Structures are given as structure tokens and as C-alpha cells.
Image: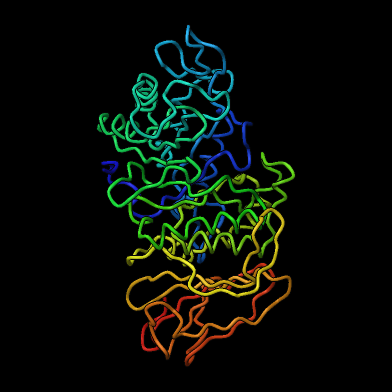
């Protein structure tokens, strides 16, 4: 029914190579990223803090580790005749060095299979009823022997049966975090989720339209109760700090305010938080550190009180945004219960101008209070007590991120 690994009880956090580097990966790059993930060059509340200290501890290698070719009578493209995956040893002279380095740094290491570059045909290309399992078995054997801890399963090759993948991994006895990256075409139900998180969308790009489109794809799963501990809906990696990635003109990069919308939205819908920027670029890191290292935003993402987060109110007026076909509501409010009478609220303004946005407390699902205390997550400061409603000015393509709680309760 589900992957028996006990992982993903909170939304997974880490880093993966694709959104910035695409196919331009090699062993030295990934090892350098691992070292950057544990660097304590920056602080939180005056304390030297690394990305892993904040929870971003899994470092994942994405596509292009494989040696593309034509193997055996079946002409597999990166498996040999027996189904053993073939590694590009020019790019990765010792692929096992990645998990070893990760474990030395108290990180975990992620791999990638059912690849898109030179996608293979070693399977029946069906989600259920797989009858060709040698490549699954040998892929998982390699995963285990190399020492990897997590796995992204893409949707390009013909090894699509996620139950077979989970069974093979369970058989090793080693818990492996599994990402289902079938772009929203293979999704869980009430009794079936043999993975820890699942893509709900096509690939995200570093543009506001793409971010808003992908955000909208998680809502149905939240409302059905199918984004939950051990089985999270995932609108793809974070584009914060990424620019001019593999999407070319589709990756112009996000402004500072657009990045707040992006990060806040992924937090409030309990999405896994997967960075992809250059963690060793001081200019980028200095710019985005206050955002990705905000412990209160991360706490909202990691909290669980029965609902993963969803929109509850929006404008009737839409605005067209480049990169998305349907209009985006000019404003939209998301909520996520945090427990203890507290509710996180994200108030998004997608309009072209600054707007005054008003939140009526009676409109919040669960109606937590009418006399309410407001905590500003971005500023990490108490705003004050308010009766019946709260009004705030929000800039164009920006978002207010707050916690609402009964006025008698303590701050967040």
C-alpha cells in the first residue's frame, strides 16, 4: 500500500542539481555543493548556521550521470544487457564518493533514475503490472551498493511501475526516500502511496507565471487529504536564487518579491523544499539567505495539524501572467493550521500595483479567533492585536506571510 520506510514524516528538505545546472554536472560540482550545504558562513539570530542546520540536508544528483550508448541485443541506452546501469566515469570517476562525502558531512545523498537524457526502454512503460524487472532490480542494487539515501524517479523512461520500485527498495532493508516525478500523471489514493512525495505538475521554471501555475496544481490533493506525512504533494523544486538555468529564455529568474511569493507558497502548502541554486555563490546566498533561512517560514512548512495548506479566498478578477495560459487571481489567500489555535496565512498580491489586502478573521477556515494576534513571519515580529480583520499593504507580486492566533495566546 505504501513505501515501508518511515521517511518523509515532515516535508523533505534539501538540494538537487537540475533547476540551475541541468545536464552540466560532475563529481567535483556535487561534492562542492555538499561542502557548501554545511558551511556556517552566515548566521541566524547571531548564531553561525548552515543550510543543513536549517533542515536542508539531502543533496541530490539529477540527470546526466549515465553513459549513454547502445547496449546488447535490446539496444538499451544506459543499461547493459543484464540491466546494470552504466555510469559516465569521465563525469563521475567514483560515483560512490558522493554518498561517502555526504555521510562524512552528516548529509544524505540522492540519486536519479528512469532518466530523461537518453531515456531507456527497459520496462513496459505502464504504471502497474510490470513484467520486465531486471533493470529495476539492478538499478536498486546499484543504489544500495553505491550508498545513496534518496531517489528521484523521473517519468521519461519506461520503468514507471512505482510499486515495483518500492518493493525492490523495501527488499534491501535500507530506508530510501522516494520522489515520484511523473509530473502529476501517477498520483496516490487513499490506500496507495509507494513513495514519499510526488510531483503534481510539469517542471517549474524561474518565472512568476510558472511558479503560480505549479502552485495551483497541489490544491486538489490538499483538499482530498492526499498531501500528508509520508506522502506529500510537490509542485517541483525551488527556483529561489536560480537564473538562466536549463530552461533558457523560460528561466529569466525571480525578483526579490516574487521569490517571497514562491518560497512562502511552497511553505504554506507543505511542499518539500528543494533548493537548486549555487550555494557557494556568495552574491546569491547573501541575497536569498534571509528568505530560505527564515526559521519561522520553515516551521510553517514542517508543521502538521491535519491539513497541508490550501487557498480559501481569492479575487474574482484575474490577471494574465507570461508563462501561464489561465489568468491568475489578482489576490489570493492560503491557509495552513499549525495547531494550538494558530493558523498561518499567506496573502498573495499578483496585481501590477501595490494593494491593500484585508483578511476577515471569520473567513479563515476553522475561525480561530475574532480578537486575534498577528505575527509577521517575514519580519519575525509581533504586529499587534486586531478585532475582526487585518489589513496590510502588499506590493506587486509579493505576499504577506502571517500567523493568526487568539489574542490571549503567546506569539509564534
Image quadrant in which the C terminus is located: bottom left
At 62% across and 31% down in the image, what residue appears? 23
Left or right of 259 in this view: 77: left
Q: Position of residue 273 (x, y in %)?
A: 49, 52
At 53% across and 17% down in the image, what residue appears? 77
Q: Nearer the viewer, residue 52 or 250?
A: 250
Left or right of 243 in this view: 98: left
Q: Nearer the viewer, residue 399 or 216?
A: 216
Q: Nearer the viewer, residue 150 or 130?
A: 130
Q: Position of residue 185 (x, y in %)?
A: 47, 43
Total of numbered circles in the picture?
Answer: 0
Q: Quadrant of residue 159?
A: top left
Left or right of 128 in this view: 13: right
Q: Position of residue 280 (x, y in %)?
A: 61, 44
Image quadrant in which the N terminus is located: top left
Identify whether 45 is placed above or below 383: above
Identify whether 8 is placed above or below 79: below
Identify whether 36 is placed above or below 171: below
Residue projecting furthest to the bottom: 387
At 62% across and 36% down in the image, what residue appears? 22
Residue projecting furthest to the top: 73
At 64% across and 52% down in the image, what residue appears? 241
Display colour scheme: rainbow
Identify whether 398 is placed above or below 11: below
Amino acid at each position: 500500500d505504501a513505501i515501508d520506510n518511515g521517511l518523509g514524516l515532515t516535508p523533505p528538505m534539501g538540494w538537487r542539481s537540475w533547476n540551475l545546472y541541468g545536464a552540466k554536472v560532475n563529481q567535483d560540482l556535487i561534492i562542492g555543493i555538499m561542502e557548501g550545504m554545511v558551511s556556517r558562513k552566515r548566521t541566524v539570530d547571531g548564531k553561525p548556521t548552515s543550510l543543513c542546520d536549517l533542515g536542508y540536508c539531502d543533496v541530490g544528483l539529477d540527470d546526466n550521470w549515465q553513459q549513454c550508448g547502445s547496449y546488447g541485443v535490446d539496444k538499451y541506452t544506459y543499461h547493459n544487457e543484464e540491466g546494470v546501469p552504466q555510469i559516465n566515469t569521465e563525469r563521475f570517476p567514483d560515483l560512490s564518493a558522493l554518498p561517502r562525502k555526504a555521510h562524512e558531512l552528516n548529509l544524505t545523498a540522492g540519486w536519479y533514475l528512469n532518466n530523461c537524457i537518453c531515456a531507456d526502454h527497459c520496462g513496459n512503460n505502464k504504471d502497474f503490472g510490470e513484467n520486465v524487472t531486471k533493470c529495476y532490480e539492478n538499478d536498486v542494487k546499484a543504489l544500495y551498493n553505491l550508498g545513496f539515501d534518496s531517489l528521484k524517479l523521473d517519468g521519461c523512461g519506461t520503468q514507471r511501475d512505482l510499486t515495483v520500485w518500492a518493493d525492490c527498495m523495501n527488499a534491501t532493508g535500507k530506508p530510501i526516500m522516494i520522489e515520484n516525478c511523473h509530473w502529476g500523471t501517477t498520483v496516490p489514493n487513499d490506500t496507495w502511496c509507494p513513495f514519499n512525495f510526488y510531483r503534481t505538475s510539469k517542471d517549474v521554471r524561474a518565472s512568476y507565471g510558472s511558479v503560480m501555475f505549479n502552485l495551483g496544481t497541489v490544491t486538489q490533493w490538499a483538499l482530498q487529504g492526499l498531501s500528508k506525512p509520508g506522502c506529500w504533494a510537490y509542485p517541483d523544486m525551488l527556483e529561489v536564487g536560480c537564473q538562466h538555468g536549463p530552461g533558457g529564455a523560460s528561466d529569466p529568474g525571480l525578483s526579490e518579491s516574487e521569490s517571497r511569493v514562491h518560497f512562502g507558497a511552497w511553505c504554506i502548502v507543505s511542499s518539500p523544499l528543494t533548493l537548486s541554486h549555487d550555494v557557494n555563490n556568495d552574491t546569491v546566498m547573501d541575497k536569498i539567505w534571509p528568505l530560505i533561512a527564515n526559521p519561522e517560514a520553515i516551521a510553517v512548512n514542517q508543521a502538521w495539524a491535519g491539513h497541508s495548506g490550501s487557498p480559501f479566498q481569492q479575487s474574482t478578477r484575474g490577471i494574465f501572467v507570461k508563462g501561464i495560459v489561465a489568468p491568475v487571481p489578482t489576490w489570493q489567500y492560503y491557509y495552513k493550521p499549525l495547531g494550538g489555535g494558530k493558523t498561518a496565512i499567506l496573502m498573495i498580491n499578483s496585481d501590477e500595483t501595490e494593494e491593500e489586502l484585508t483578511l476577515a478573521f471569520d473567513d479563515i477556515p476553522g475561525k480561530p479567533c475574532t480578537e486575534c494576534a498577528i505575527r509577521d513571519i517575514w519580519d519575525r515580529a509581533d504586529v499587534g492585536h486586531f478585532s475582526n480583520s487585518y489589513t496590510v499593504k502588499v506590493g506587486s507580486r509579493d505576499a504577506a506571510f502571517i500567523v493568526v492566533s487568539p489574542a490571549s495566546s503567546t506569539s509564534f
